[in-house]
Amino acid sequence: MKKVVLTGDRPTGPLHIGHYVGSLQKRVQLQDSGEYEQFVMIADLQALTDNADNPQKIKDNIIEVMLDYLAVGLDPNKTTFLLQSQIPALYELPMFYANLVTVSRLQRNPTIKNEIKLRNFENNLPVGFMTYPISQAADITAFRAKYVPVGIDQLPMLEQTREIVNSFNRIYKTDILVEPEAILPDKEVCYRFVGTDGNTKMSKSLGNCIYLKDSEETIRKKIMGMYTDPNHIRVEDPGKTENNPVFIYLEAFAKDSDFEKYLPEYKNLDELKAHYERGGLGDVVVKKFLNSIVQDLLRPIRERREILEQNKSEILEILRKGTEYSIEYTNETLEKVKDAIGLGYLNINLNNK
Ligand code: TRP
């Protein structure tokens, strides 16, 4: 049996280059290796945990996220797409898992802590938001996923999932739940991708994203307006490349062949960095170079997306088929979980239609 890979995204907006370098790129790679069974989930239930008052936004973004998936090269013949809210097991499993997790354990989750602050949830925290790591553990374990390609923000969710798996298997004397591992991006600068404003995280709510679907002109404006080293005022001034988002993006995207093509005065990023640090290299030159590279990356994605947009009903059909398959797939896990706990009283077979 092939090892299972599963990831998901909240459909709260179109996907951006942070998603691309943090996970999408890796998913395409895993898919094309042919070595795994891969599931990619649109996490609309999780999106509702902080958008309960705006289900329309979530609904509208389901197709946006599907378009992004297909545009970057995820292929429905090789990857199963599914919509979280339509999978019964993903509602049932958290009910069992919640008994294995303490409130104080949830409160210690650093990602949750941070997100609570960002959303001003300190005094009106929805229980569903607080407990979404339990729901995410259900997502991962329902598919018996071994690998989860994610950025570093998701590591606490995987840690929580492993704890649930271990408690469950120990208490109910079974080995049915699989302990998952994260697959981080190849480059460390992609573990958590900096925003165009220099903020440590690219995020829609911070307004510092470059979206996969952005037009050529929008991308250019965003890049030319990027935050750099604030002390690099005149061209002659020595500049800092560390923590400089323009150089971080180059670290993520620039290949030596890009230098040959657009900036042949330099062989590679090290030479460009050395010049910037010495002084005598202006931000505009570096930003223009970055713009050329990002345009080359996003142009084919955008063009594919525009074609796909003409076929929305076909795309929803792909999602429907994948979701149906996923219902059966996860019901197998659910049935085993209930058996392990000893809840098989009435012998009801979930996949019997
Ligand atoms: N928490 C993830 C995000 O914010 C989305 C997600 C939901 C997920 N369920 C998952 C990711 C399971 C990986 C595995 O983007």
Image (tube, grey):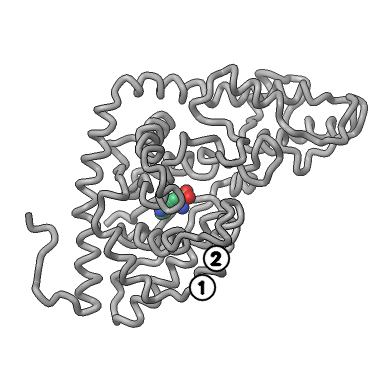
SS of the residue under disc 2: loop
SS of the residue under disc 1: helix
Q: Position of residue 152 (x, y in %)?
A: 57, 54
Q: What crowding class fits label 1: few (fewer than 14 Cα within 10 Å), some (14-19), or many (20 or more)? A: few
Residue drawn at point x = 37 percent, y = 47 percent: 44
Q: Residue furthest right?
A: 236
- Left/right of residue 256 with respect to residue 347 in the rendered view: right
Residue placed under numbered mark 1 in the picture: 105
The amino acid beneath tag 1 is Arg
Q: What crowding class fits label 2: few (fewer than 14 Cα within 10 Å), some (14-19), or many (20 or more)? A: some
Q: Quadrant of residue 292?
A: top right
Quadrant location of the C terminus?
bottom left
Residue drawn at point x = 62 percent, y = 24 percent: 293
Determine whether label 2 and label 1 are within 8 Å by CB: yes
| Above or below, 230 relative to 350 | above
- Left/right of residue 273 with respect to residue 56 in the rendered view: right
Quadrant location of the N terminus?
bottom left
Residue placed under numbered mark 2 in the picture: 109
- Left/right of residue 310 with respect to residue 325 in the rendered view: right
Q: CA distance from mark 2 to mark 1?
A: 7 Å
The answer to whether mark 1 is within 8 Å of ligand 1 is no
Q: Quadrant of residue 267?
A: top right
The amino acid beneath tag 2 is Asn
Foreground: 299 or 344? 344
Foreground: 59 or 254? 59
